[in-house]
Amino acid sequence: MKLIGLSKEEVKEAFRKGEFTIAVYGMGKMGLPLAAVFADHGANVIGVDINERVVEMINRGENHIKEEPGLDELVRKNVEAGRLRATTDGVGAAKQADVMVILVPTLTDERGNMKLGPVYDVAEKISQGLEKGDIVITEATMPPGTTESLVSILEKSGLKLGEFGLAHAPERTMTGTAIRDITGQYPKIVGANDGRTLEAVMGIYETINRKGVIPMSSIKAAEAVKVFEGVYRDVNIGLANELALWCEEHGLDALEVFQAANTQPYCHLHMPGAGVGGHCIPVYPWFVINLARKTNPRLTKTAREINDSMPHHVVELTIKALNGAGKPLKGSNVLILGLTFRGGVREFMKAAAKPIIEELKKWGANVYAYDPLCTREDAERFGTEWKEDFKDVDAIVITADHREFKELDLGKIAGEVRTKIIVDGRNVIDPEKAEKAGFIYMRVGRV
Ligand SMILES: NC(=O)c1ccc[n+]([C@@H]2O[C@H](COP(=O)([O-])OP(=O)(O)OC[C@H]3O[C@@H](n4cnc5c(N)ncnc54)[C@H](O)[C@@H]3O)[C@@H](O)[C@H]2O)c1
């Protein structure tokens, strides 16, 4: 059933009765939860991915995103009910679907250049199956202006914009809370090419999201919402890091100061730390920077610079702590705790551990690593050796806030290491407990 021209209420009813088909392109950490939630609310859903293993797993009713609570059950149930299936055939899916959602990676390279190949690839495939009355929605985080740049590709179908609808409805969530967020932690943001498409897309998201939808005046405004959320985080983490470095110089504990300052409702100082990783926060500022023509986004650039310099600062703290214990970095055994970029999630994109390991090795340290979500092979990929104990360790450097690290038995570890040093890049250890166990304890903003 085509949705353009229907009222929100008609769309909601058709959704629950399974009267239309949604194709979701990209069955990753965001796409699979979304597809499963759509199916669970009644729609016929086709998941499209270029990864055959992922497609086969989904068709067996298996979830491959293990960090997402509740997703195993949601995928199994909806595949069994025949509402969710997957394919590698993006053109075929477009021919069958009435609504196509694009949720493939939008990234940047090392220099911040945007890499939007997967989005354009999907748009090409959709154009080969696009029909009058279909709606194409981008949910991937898009550099503002990108969704509308797909029009020329989609119009290869022979249809003109208006005969098909185009909208942006950004995914405002993260791995581990996707189902909760998609179904109503925050309102959905939607911008569309015209009022009729906006109405239909609002009907779709109001069906699955208890918090409702915020309609935006344009697609580009909707794209800017999600990008600005990321920039806000990056700039504020940059500020927290800058103030934390200032605290180090002045003998203050940054977290003590921040926590007290944040009791005032206009102050929201973020957490300083070893750097900003992941596919989102360190990526989206580049969308703003790269698309600036007359403005110079100095603040955004500076925050990126500060945050990218934090792994180096953690190395400096490690050297300082070792020197304080009468040891040079060269020849010391450093154990990195945490290879992923954040706690509880097996994602390595821009993980702080990588530059920290590289620099420590450059200066002659013997570097080892452990991460409860990783394997020996992961450590090797980071150019280091796997180590599951604390024997002969001269410095422990924490680079991911895994729950297991918050629960470390410091008294026991103090009896195993060779030199009692903890450099806590993620603020997971209570300084008092560490010092009571005899450790030299440092973190960003407290030396
Ligand atoms: N991960 C997050 O926490 C998060 C949060 C909010 C928004 N986002 C945004 O969501 C989008 C997707 O991110 P993700 O974390 O789900 O990525 P992901 O890497 O987990 O999954 C992407 C999936 O897309 C597939 N894919 C790649 N190219 C394809 C193509 N041409 N056709 C079909 N499938 C293709 C991949 O095989 C993979 O399964 C990105 O724009 C990201 O910025 C991610």
Image (tube, rainbow, N blue to C red):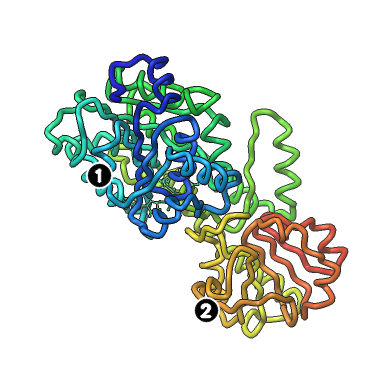
Badge 2, how many Cα within 10 Å: few under 14, some, many 20+?
Answer: few
Disc 1: which residue:
92
> Tag on residue 253?
none
Q: Quadrant of the C terminus?
A: bottom right
Query: Depth-wise, is mark 1 or mark 2 nearer the camera?
Result: 1
Residue in the picture at 55% in, 24% down: 210
Mark 1: which amino acid?
Gly
Placement of 151 over or under 237, stated as above or below:
above
Q: Residue 200, position in %: x, y? A: 35, 21
Question: CA–CA distance between discs 1 and 2?
Answer: 51 Å
Furthest residue in direction right, as rendered: 436
**Would residue 210 be found to the left or right of residue 23 on screen?**
right
Pick whichever of labels 1 and 2 is earlier in the sequence: 1
Q: Position of residue 443 (x, y in %)?
A: 69, 59
Q: Position of residue 106 (x, y in %)?
A: 36, 48
Q: Image point 71% across, 30% down: which residue?
A: 264
* 437 sits to left or right of 94: right
Nearer to the camera, 196 or 51: 51
Q: Amino acid at mark 2?
A: Lys
Q: Nearer the viewer, residue 179 or 374?
A: 179
SS for callout 1: helix
- Return the residue nearer the eye: 177 or 15: 15
Residue 67 in view here: yes
Farthest residue to the front: give it. 81
Residue at 36 percent of width and 35 percent of height: 22
Say which residue label 2 marks.
362
Q: Residue at x 51, y 61 (%)?
A: 348
